[in-house]
Image (tube, coloured by chain):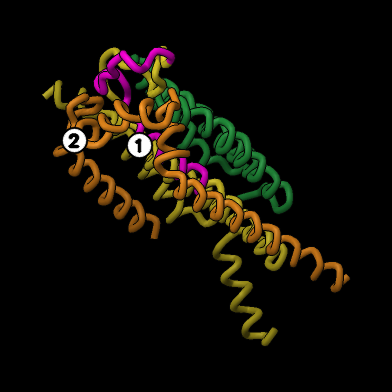
Amino acid sequence: MLEFIISKYNFWLYVILMMIGLYAMLAKRNLVKKLIGMNIFQTAIILFYVSIGVKKGSVHVPIIVDSHGHGAQLIHAADYLNPLPHVLMLTAIVVSIATTGVALAVLILIYRRYQTLNEDEIIHIRQARQKAGV
Amino acid sequence: MKTIILAFVILSGGLLIYGTIDMPAWGDPHSPANSYVSPLYIEEALKETETPNIVTAVLADYRGYDTMGETTVIFTAAVACALLLRGWSEGRKERE
Amino acid sequence: MIWQLDLLILVFVIICALAAINIKDLLSAVIILGAYSFLMCLLWAEMGAVDVAFTEASVAAAVSTILFVGAVLKTTRRSKD
């Protein structure tokens, strides 16, 4: 039982991080808070993917040491970390900054039109404006 | 409303934790992710691309078109930001 | 891979995430999100993903925090939740 907990507690902490992000996205009424929740959710998922490539024991980071005389030397895959999750998550980080930038631009536009960032107040003002026929 | 959301979040978190029971142990060198495709990349990358850093070799050489598409994504986001914010400031000038 | 360091940084990351979504002042929340990104970068460097770590440090911790601070300064700092 203890061995089971030791081999899995990392995944449970990632799930707790994902739950924090999901709760912020759903329950918070402020739009900046929702964006912060989205960022936490994204980084939790990226963290999960990166941790898949981890190998316990004495392994190198995926940079080949002593690459000069590589004709003769043999490279053992067990000596290096798994590089594929790192590559894919590099792409995901860059895409996440793009979505954050566009979301912040839309947020500034919303504030200029409604003078608030609270979701309930925005819906209220919108309905009042529609009734007034603006 | 907040209790419904909290219940939904805890339910989804519980399902994810239930899913981790079948996963290989954390840091296992013989897990499926570490033993099928990646050994080929680690052993062949230096021979095929002459790059000591395997991450760079995969990112810029094996998946070069993917990285090019990613640049398109960044460009689209930058153009979208510029159009959104510029349109606002010009409209405000006209109103004033 | 040192599991004590790993667990310590993970607990710090979770504390930072809870603080970032619970604080009322938006500028403080955004700065705490920057600290969260740096701790996440430390966690990845500790896991051996050095390329991901310095991309996170330069892109998510620096550029994203600057964008957030700019947006908060252009809008409002106050928040009800």
Asked whether residue A56 is drawn in magenta, I would say no
Q: Position of residue A107 (x, y in %)?
A: 63, 58
* The furthest residue to the left: A1
Q: In the displayed structure, would residue A40 be above or below residue A55?
A: below
Q: Chain of mark 2?
A: B
> Residue at the spot x=51%, y=49% of the render?
B68
Range of magenta residues: A68-95
> Residue at the spot x=39%, y=19% of the render?
A64
Give the class, few, some or many, for how many residues have Cα within 10 Å of label 2's Cα (few <14, many ≥20). few
Residue under circle 1? A85
- The residue under label 1 is which amino acid type? Pro
Asked whether residue A86 is drawn in magenta, I would say yes
The chain displayed yellow equals A
Query: Which secondary structure, mark 2?
Result: helix
On the picture, is C37 further left or further right than B21? Answer: right
- The residue under label 2 is which amino acid type? Pro
* The furthest residue to the right: B96
> Residue at the spot x=26%, y=19% of the render?
A76
Per the rendering, the colour in which chain B appears is orange
> Residue at the spot x=52%, y=34% of the render?
C56
The chain displayed green equals C
Residue under circle 2? B32
The answer to whether residue B86 is visible is yes
Cα–Cα span, label 1 and label 2? 13 Å
Q: Chain of mark 1?
A: A
Q: Position of residue A14 (x, y in %)?
A: 33, 36
Q: In the displayed structure, would residue B26 be above or below residue B20?
A: above
The answer to whether residue C80 is visible is no
